[in-house]
Image: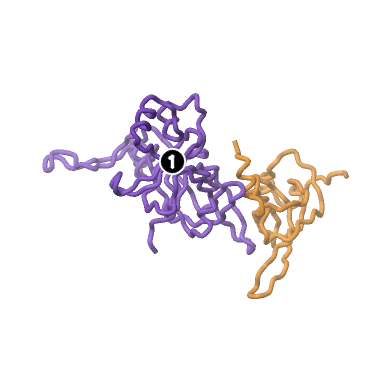
Chain colours: A purple, B orange
Amino acid sequence: MVVGLLGRKVGMTQIFEPSGRVIPVTVLEAGPCHVLQLRTEPRDGYEAVQLGYLDKPRRLASRAARGHVAKLDSKRQRRRAAAGVESTAKADCEPQRFIRELRGPVDGCQVGQELKVDIFAEVKAVDVVGTSKGRGTAGVMKRHKFHGQRASHGVKKVHRHPGSIGCNTDPHHVFKGRRMAGHYGNARCTMRNLAVVRVDAANNLLLVRGAVPGPNGGLVIIRGTNKLR
Amino acid sequence: MRSKLLDVAEQGSVKAEVPAFEVGDTVDVHCRILEGEKERIQIFNGLVIARAGSGSRATFTVRRIVQGEGVERKFPLHSPRIAAIEVKRSGVTRRAKLYYLRERTGKAVRLKEKSR
């Protein structure tokens, strides 16, 4: 069975061990998630569990989104039922705001099942996938940690510039992959192997050691780590 | 804005009762110190010159003069290593951080005692 959930980053804080050691933790609100659909080898060519997190008001959801989670009455449905075609299983929940698939074996999962944070009770470490904070167009110092140029000694107006970007006549072009200024952040980002510090099933909270990409309130995917020691 | 869920997560790391003390107070901080197997209490006495942070991240800074040299220690308020905080004396202050005392020595460091 896939061990994973969708959730939201609450923020960072620190907690104390009895010895007085401080553990920096990120608090994640994980689940509860509905299983919306199962991807299977014969039907889809791969195995995955589709999860949904956070209810969306029905009036804001498209008919497709509503039909994805619950049976809707339609002419086509009635015709198919009359012809004896079995309709696919539905989760029977509210339309979901954040829907993602987690790859992995689907055995032990059913459509409509509700997954809660207690599935991480036995898990030592998780991977957290989020969207990093967007920084817009950023220069090379911020984006690639270039050192820039000196403050004085004849440097004029180019203190944060990258300097040379290549040779002259010989290659006659700038090599591909040359790091330059440009759009930075707002990209999918994974933090792997974050230790699980605490699982709070009553409040759907998961505390992991270390930082997680994205702003507070950002949506994240949490799964058992795929990093092998 | 700080989420209420953070407070929930910090439960257990925040002391239920924190002794009342303020910037300008002279305090005895009882620190637990581990020496091998044994645990003993060491007292750090000095003037609280700053309090910072909130929740389980709250800290306070204590300054004292040791052999003519200023020594400052920053304690996590909710650390289990801190056994107790005793207020010895309260001084009148007009600001939240007393960093200006770092440039002063001798008599100039004194604060007026708060009338209780």
Q: Which of the image's four quarters has the C terminus of chain A?
A: bottom left
Query: Residue placed at 74% from the left, 49% from the top?
Result: B109
Looking at the rendering, in which quadrant would you find the N terminus of chain A?
bottom left
Q: Which residue is situated farthest in the right direction here?
A: B116
Q: Which of A137 and B89 is in front in this view?
A: A137
Question: Is any part of residue A159 visible from this angle?
Answer: no
Q: Nearer the viewer, residue B28 or A106?
A: A106
In the figure, A199 relative to B100: above or below? below
Residue A27 falls left or right of residue B93? left
Whole-percent x, y for residue B112 in the image:
81, 45
Instruction: Read off the residue under disc 1.
Output: A36
Q: On the picture, is B66 further left or further right than A174?
A: right
Across and down, in percent, residue B78 comes to: 68, 54
How many numbered circles are shown? 1
Can see residue A212?
yes
Q: What element carries label 1?
A: strand
Residue A78 sits above or below residue A49 on the image: above
Q: Badge 1, how many Cα within 10 Å: few under 14, some, many 20+? A: many
Chain letter for mark 1? A
